[in-house]
Structures are given as C-alpha cells and as structure tokens.
Amino acid sequence: MKLRVLIVSAASLLLLYLGDSIALRLRHDQLGSVTVERYDAIPEKNGKTEFQFEQPIAQNCVRSLFPHRGYPACWYLKRHNEQRIDY
C-alpha cells in the first residue's frame, strides 16, 4: 500500500513537471526579472557579524511553477529577494 502511494505520488509530480515544461515552451514571455538585494555577512573576532549591503541587481527568472533552464521560478524569487552571502 505504501509503495503504491509512493509510485502514484512520484508519477503525479513527474506529470506536473512535464506539463509545466510544455506550458513554459508555449509561452512567448518565458523569462521575467526580479530585483534582488544582496548583502555580505562577515563574522568578526568578537563573535558579532558585520553586514555590508551591495547594490540591488536584476536577476532573471522563469514564469513557471518549477525552475527550468538554470533559472529560478519568478514566484519563488519574489518571495526570497534577499540573498545573504556568508564568509
């Protein structure tokens, strides 16, 4: 019973991904752009962290449910538009 649920779930996820990929290829406006704010987190000797903010940049994304062709999904990038770089 558990194996059947696992197989059905995996097959459903695969079909959803393939449908998303086909829908993306049929769209004329496949790529979008989201402004991302990056900042560096630099640890100091006293245990504190210094933050240095960089200029916001425009990052490309795909207008789909899943990431495709090396680009993140736009809906995800809009919700995670701050990127912390730890040193």
Image: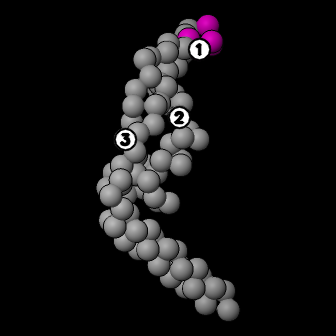
Residue at numbered disc 3: 60
Residue 7 makes an appearance in the image: yes
Can you give x and y, in whole percent of width and height, for residue 2 in the image? 66, 86
- State the image quarter where residue 56 is shown: top left
Magenta span: 46-50
The numbered mark at residue 69 is none
Give the prevailing secondary structure in the magenta stretch: loop
Instruction: Check the image and report above or below for 23 versus 62.
Output: below
Residue occupying the point 36% across, 62% down: 27
Q: How many residues crowd mark 1 within 10 Å: few (<14), some (14–19), many (20+)?
A: few
The numbered mark at residue 49 is 1
Can you give x and y, in whole percent of width and height, for residue 76 in the image? 53, 47
In this view, the mark in front (1 or 2): 2
- Tell me the kind of residue under disc 3: Asn
Give the quadrant of the N terminus.
Answer: bottom right
Residue occupying the point 44% across, 68% down: 20
Q: How many residues crowd mark 3 within 10 Å: few (<14), some (14–19), many (20+)?
A: some
Q: CA distance from mark 3 to mark 2?
A: 12 Å
In this view, the mark in front (3 or 1): 3
Q: CA distance from mark 1 to mark 2?
A: 21 Å
The numbered mark at residue 81 is 2
Say how the picture is coloured.
Answer: one colour
First in residue order: circle 1 vs circle 2: 1
Q: Callout 1: helix, strand or loop?
A: strand
Can you give x and y, in whole percent of width and height, for residue 52 in the image? 50, 13
Please report contact status of discs 3 and 1: CB closer than 8 Å, yes or no. no
